[in-house]
Image (cartoon, grey):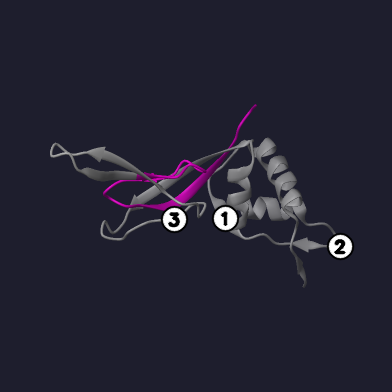
Amino acid sequence: MHYHIPSDEQVLNGLEKVLKEFRTVHSQNKLKKLVKKELTTKKKTFNVSGSRLRNIAINSDFVKLEIHTREGDPKKLMTKCPVCNSVLKRVKNLTIWGGEVTIEFRCKKCSYWTGKKKRIPTRYVFHFKMN
C-alpha cells in the first residue's frame, strides 16, 4: 500500500470538514485518523503526521487549541515551544533589588506557556471556532 503526502491546503480542507462535523476532537491521534479518513479516496491513501496536522491547525483561523499538560523537570531549560516549535518569549519581572528575573515563558503563536514548573503537553483538544 502506498501512502501519499497531502498538500497543506488538502490537510486544511480535510481538517475544516472534520471539525465542522464533530465541533470538538479530544485528541491529536483521533483528529489525525478522522482527517486521514476524510482525505483518503478509492485511488489514493493519504497520511499526515500528528505534529504537521497540529501546526496546520494552529495556523488556521478556525481552530481553537486547548493544551493539557503535566509537570516536568524544572531544571530543563526551554527555548522552543513544545507545541509549535516557535521561539518562547521570556516574561520578566523586577526584583526588589532592581534585578530582573524570568517568571514564565510564553508562545506568541499558540496558547502554550510555562513557569518555574515546566509544563509538558500531554493532550491536545481541537475545537471548531466560529468566526
Q: Position of residue 41 (x, y in %)?
A: 82, 57
Residue in view at x 64 percent, y 36 percent: 61
Q: State the mark number for residue 43.
A: 2
Residue 106's quadrant in the figure?
top left
Determine the image quadrant of residue 80.
bottom left
Picture disc at residue 18: none
In the image, which residues are magenta?
105-131
Whole-angstrom CA distance, mark 3 to mark 2, is 39 Å
Give the image location of residue 75, x and y in percent.
26, 60
Going from N to C along the chain, the mark reached first, 2 or 1, is 1
Label total for image = 3
The type of residue carrying mark 3 is: Lys
Residue 103 higher or lower than 48, as above or below:
above
- Residue 46: image x %, image y %? 75, 61
Provide residue 87's location: percent of width, then percent of height. Answer: 46, 52
Q: CA distance from mark 3 to mark 1?
A: 23 Å
Between circles 3 and 1, the one closer to the viewer is 3
Classed neighbour count for the residue bearing mark 2: other residues with Cα under 10 Å, few (<14), some (14–19), many (≥20): few
Is residue 120 covered in magenta?
yes
Pointers 3 and 2 in contact (CB under 8 A)? Answer: no
State left or right for residue 97 relative to residue 53: left
3D distance between C-alphas at marks 2 and 1? 24 Å
> Label 1 amino acid?
Asn
Q: Which residue is mark 3?
A: 80
Q: Residue beneath label 1, please?
A: 29
Query: Regarding mark 2 in the picture, which secondary structure is present there?
Result: loop
What residue do we see at 30% from left, 61% from top?
76
Using residue 67 as the reference point, say whether residue 100 is left or right of it. Answer: left
Is residue 60 found inside the magenta-colored segment of the image? Answer: no
